Image: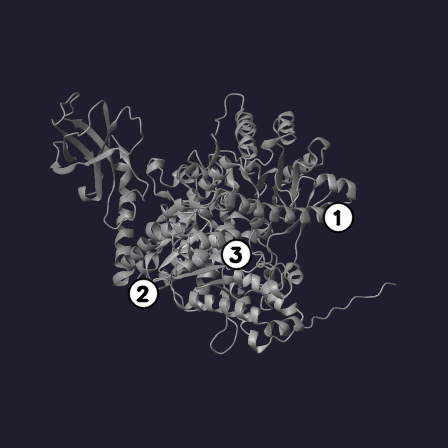
Amino acid sequence: MPASNFFLEVNPKIPRKLARLVDLSEDLWYSWDRQTRSLFARLDPPLWRATGHNPKLFLRLVDESRLQAAAQDRVFIDVYHRVLSARDTYLLEPQTQGPAGEFAADDLIGYFCAEYGLHESFPIYSGGLGILAGDHCKAASDLSLPFVSVGLLYRQGYFSQRIDAQGNQQADYTDARFEDLPVRPVLRHDGGEVLISLDCFPGRVVKAKLWVAEVGRIRLYLLDTNIAENTEPDRHITHRLYGGDLQTRIQQEIVLGVGGVRALRAVGLAPSVWHINEGHAAFLVLERIRELVGQGLDFYAALEAVAASTVFTTHTPVPAGHDIFPADMVREYFGMMIAECGVDAPEFLELGAHPGEGFSMTALAVRGSRWQNGVSRIHGGVAARMLAPLWPEVPPEENPVGYVTNGVHIPSFLAAEWVDTLDRLLGGQWRNQLSQIPFWERVAQIPDHLFWSIRQTLKSQMLMTVRQHLTEQHLRNGMGEARLDRVLRHLDPIDPNVLVVGFARRFATYKRATLLFDDMERLRQLATHSERPIVFLFAGKAHPADSPGQDLVRTIARFANDPQFLGHIHIIENYDLALARHLVSGVDVWLNNPEYPLEASGTSGEKAGANGVINLSVLDGWWGEGFNGHNGWGIKPHPDDAGGNSRHDEANELYTLLEQEVAPLYYDRGSYGYAPGWVKMSKASMKSIIPRFNAERMVTDYVGDAYRPAASNGRRFAADSFVAAQVLAVWKSRVRELWPQVRLFSLEGRRERLQLGQGMELHLDVDLGGLNPADVVVELLLEREYEALQRSPDSYRFLPAGLSDQGREHFMLSLTPDLCGSLRYRIRTFPYHTLLTHPYEMGLMRWL
C-alpha cells in the first residue's frame, strides 16, 4: 500500500526592512509595473515562475533566508526603495489635468463587467472582454478618474488548456485559493464582513460576500456566493466563469447586476455614471429602477432617471454573445421586484423585449441607457443595424449607437526593451504623450540597426518561451527526443532569422483560424521555401461547449504533425496573458483573418503593433481604422458570391501577400545584416498604432463622449426630486399613445429647377393626431443625388404656420439650397422634447 501524502505550508517572516513587499503584492499596480514584478523575481526566479508570477503567493512560499539576504543586499534595498517611491508618487500625486479635471467633486463612474483580465496571477478572465476591462481599469487609474469597478470573484476562472497528441483540447479547472489572490474581504466598521442580500431568487434569499482588489488608484469590488449562509447550490453560483446552464447564467447576472448595485450602496458609494460593459450586467438597470420607485417615483419616471446616467457598450456582433432568457424564467426570479415596481409583468418584461426573442439582456441595457456604443467604427455600424429593431422607425445609421474603438494599456504590453529604449532616446515624457500623434513620429529617429536588434532580441526571448512550452507539451504527449528536435529546429533563440507569423486568440469559428489551410500545396510552398521559410505559431482556447471551435484546434494540431509541415506549424497550449505578452512582442507578423464583419474590434493586433510587430489582417474591427497602407497589410473583405467563395478569395489574397510582399520584404537583408524595408514598416506600425489605439485614448473618448455628459444628464434628471424624469416620462407616454395617428400630407410649392441663390417656399400639412406642433420636428433632408464622398445630408426645419383648411397643422419652409447639381430631398417628422438625450431615442419617425 503506497504511503499517504500530507502537506504543510511553512510561511517565512518578512524582515521589517522589507515589510512593504506585502503592500506591493496586494496592489494590482504590479500588473503593469515591471519594476515591481522584477523585484519579486530577483528574490527567487524559479519560484517566481512556478507561482505564476503571483506576488502574494510568492511571499508565502519564498525561503526566509532569501528574504534575510535581500534585506542585507544594498542593491536590492536600493531597487526596493525606488519601487516604493514610484508607487507612492503614483498614488499620492494623482493627475488633475485632462480628463480627471472634467468631473464634479461628487462624480463617480461605476463600471460593471463579468470578467477582468488584469494579470495571469488573477484568473477571473477568459479572453478579449476581460482583457479590455482590465485595461480600461488601468487606464482609469492612470488618468486619476473617479472610478470604481464591479465584478464577480470566481473560484474557477477560465480553464487551463491541454492539447493531447491527437489535438483534442482538455479543459482543466482548478479552484483558486482566495488567500493567494490580491483581494481582501470588505469589512464593516465593527469588523464584520460585508454581505449583500439578494431577494430575487425564488423562495429564498441568497447572500454574497464582498471582496475588494486594489488596482492602482481605483478599486475593484467582487461578489462571491460561496459562503456558509447559502445553500450548497447557491454557493456554486459564482464558482465558475461562464459555467453552468441558463439557470446558472441568470443567477450570476443577478448577482453581478442587482448585487453589484447593492454592494456599492453597502460601501457608501453612489456613482453618477453607470457603465454596463456588455449585457451581462444589465440587471443593474432593474435594481436602480426598484430603488427609485421605493423613493416615490413611478416606474417609467424611474426608468428615465436611470437611463439618463447609464452607458452601455456592446462587444460582439455574434448572436451567441448576447444573453437571452425565457420570459417565464425572468418572471420567476423577478416576481418580487415586479411587485415592488408597481407594474404588471408584461410591462416589466417589455424592457428586455426584442423581436423574435425572449428577454434580451442587450435590449434591457439599451432601453436602460442613453449612451450606447460599439467598439470600433465598423462594429458601431454593425451594432446599429443589429439593434435597429429597438428604434423601429429610425434609419440604422441615425439611431443612437455610436462607437469608441478599443485600445490597449501600453504600459502593460510594451516590452521592457522598448520601454528602456524610449526612455533613453525619447525621454521619459513619452509616458505623458501616449495619445499625441506628432510625438510618435520620433520613433523614426531610432537607428535602424538598433531597432532591428531590439526586435530580434524580443523574438529570441519569445522563441525561448515557446520552445519551453512546446517541449513540455510534446514530451507529455509521448513525443521522442529525435522528433522533438525536428519539430523545434526553426525555433532557435540563438539564430532568430526565420520569419515567424503568430495567430493567437479565442478559437471561435468566425475568427477562421484555419483559413491559412485553404490551399495546402500553396501553403507548403510558402512555409518550406528554401530561401524564405515561414513558421506559423497558433495559440488559443475553444470554449468547452464549442465543438466547432475544438475542431479548429484539432485541425491545426493535425497539420502541425503532418510531415510536410513539421517544424513550420505549431499550436501552443494554454494561451494566457503571460504567453500573450511574449507572442505580441516577439513574432514578426500578427495574423488575423476573421469573417467580416464579425470581429467587433480585436486588441491583440494593437498590442503587437505597439511592439513593432506588423499586422496582416482582414480589414475588420480596429484594423479597418488602423491600416494606412504603410504600417502592415490589409485583406479586403470579399462578399460571398453565388457560390459562397469569399473564404477562398480571401485565402488567395493571404497567400499572395505572404508570397509576394511579406516574405520578400523580411528576407531582403541589406549589407548590414538587417531588412531596411521591414524596419521602415515596423516603425510605421509603432508610430501609427501607439497613439491611436491605446487605452488612455479609449478612456478619454469615453469621458468626452459618454461619462461627462451622462454625469451632467443624471444630475439634470435627479434635480428637484426628479421632476425632469417625471415630465419626460409623462410626455413620452402621451407621444407613444398618439403617434400612430401622425401623418404627413400635401407638400406644396415644389419646383424642379432653381438657379443658385434662388429659393422656394414649401408648405406641408401634418396630422399630429392630438400632439402639439412643439412636440415634433418637421424636417427636410437635402443631399446631392450623386455624391462621390458619402456625407450627412443638410437638414432644414419647417416652422409651424397655424391650421390648414382641413384642420391639420400647417408647416412652412423657405428653402434656398447652397448646393449645385442634381439634388434630392426627403421630409420627415419625429418627436421632440428638450429633455431627450438623443433626438431619435424614442425610435419614432414618419416620412412623407
Q: Nearer the viewer, residue 397 or 257?
A: 397
- Residue 833 on image: x %, y %: 24, 47
Image point (35%, 36%), residue name: 397
- Residue 819 on image: x %, y %: 19, 28
Q: Which residue is mark 3?
A: 118
Q: Mark 2: which secondary structure?
A: loop
Q: Which residue is mark 2?
A: 105
What whole-number distance in Å separates the C-alpha atoms at marks 1 and 3? 30 Å
Q: Residues within 10 Å of mark 3 (few under 14, many from 20)?
A: many
- Residue 675 on image: x %, y %: 53, 36
Quarter in which the C terminus is drawn: top left
User: Does the rendering let one see residue 201?
Assistant: no
Residue 427 horizontal side relative to residue 35, left or right: left
Image point (75%, 48%), residue name: 476
What label does residue 592 carry, if any? none
What whole-number distance in Å separates the C-alpha atoms at marks 2 and 3? 28 Å
- Residue 230 on image: x %, y %: 58, 65
Q: Which residue is mark 1?
A: 476
